[in-house]
Amino acid sequence: MTKIEKYYSARNRLRQTPAGCGLDYHSAIYHVARLGSEGHVDPDTVIADIASNTVKGARPVGLHEIQETVSNAYSIAFNRVRGGNPRKKSPATLPDARLLDEFVADYVGATAADITSASPVAIPDEPADHWSIVLDKLYRPEEYLFIGPAEGSGESFVKQVAEWRFLLGIDVHGLPNLPHVIVNSLTGSKAPCKNGVKMSMRADANVAEHRSAVIEFDGVPVEKQFAFWAAMLSMQFPIAALVHSGGKSVHGWVHVGCRSYQEWQTKVDDGLFMNMLVPLGADRMCRNPSRMSRLPGHFRRDKGQWQRLIYLNSCTGALCAQ
């Protein structure tokens, strides 16, 4: 069994060790992290894999606990390298609730209706129509997009916008089984995943244009999220769209307009997220260009709510051009 196969096997076995099982759980996630480092899996991918495969147990497990475990495993692995050039990691950036409170102080009480009233593009009253206006205003007909479930992969979920426009227009019953969209257009062909083993239609290497970054907050009350986005709009931040998830979050699609993945890493990953957004409490796992967002116009049967578009600006400038 190869190192990467051992990693996948250990990752999948996490579901047999619920969080809260004391040292058993902590040892299990450390084992996964160590195998990830040996298999040269990107640390952020390992963090996401552990989080998605953690089963609720006797106590809640925070993202910080997982991040710290992975960081320790990778640090130990790099210290064992002799004569190599281990990847340099920036210091851990932790959110500070006080920073967010100060940032939104002047906008407390802002609502979704307030944000919608500021939208340069009128938002249709019928939420089932929201996907249509997003595709029409933000994408070209020939561009390829992923639309589908979080676990979806393959050509059946990556189509040109014109084809999606036709297919989605046939079924007006809340886009069943199509809750997510990768906001950046894709190449429409296969490319290697980060681990270099599997091929994918929707990995970072498949991104054709590094146009938008997805920003969301994990564990921040939605009322405070409305205040955050109201503050960002007042600063004329290049927001292309804001989508209410139908649950407890608002997803922001920020127009960054990076010309390459390298520029993305410098200006979006390090600059925008780690220097500005993560300290305010934004989800650090949203830093990659193939990140999914909720597709407006989908009805969430688990919540009994629509995923709604609450703001749209098709003519905003690009962050990387400023």
Image (spheres, rainbow, N blue to C red):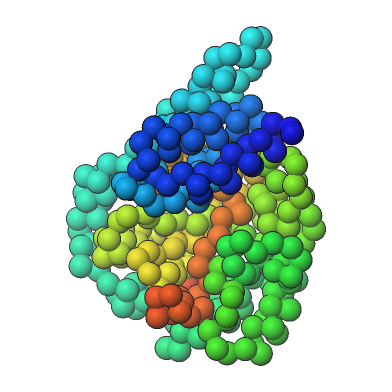
Residue found 42% across the figure and 69% down from its top? 245
Of all residues shown, which one is farthest toward the top? 83
- Does residue 50 lie above or below 225 as drawn? above
- Does residue 123 lie above or below 66 as drawn? below
Q: Give the camera-side residue of 59 and 137.
A: 59
One can see residue 31 in this view: yes
- Does residue 36 lie above or below 76 as drawn? below
Residue 90: % across, % down = 47, 28
Number of marks present in the image shown: 0
Residue found 50% across the figure and 68% down from its top? 294
**Snapshot quadrant of residue 112:** bottom left
Residue found 61% across the figure and 78% down from its top? 136
Q: Give the camera-side residue of 312 and 155.
A: 155
Residue 94: % across, % down = 34, 37
Q: Is residue 20 left or right of residue 101?
A: right
Residue found 42% across the figure and 47% down from its top? 18
Q: Is residue 157 left or right of residue 290?
A: right
Q: Give the camera-side residue of 46 and 167.
A: 46
Q: Quadrant of the N terminus?
A: top right
One can see residue 308 in this view: no
Q: Give the camera-side residue of 141 and 158.
A: 158
Residue 61: % across, % down = 36, 44
Residue 286: % across, % down = 50, 51
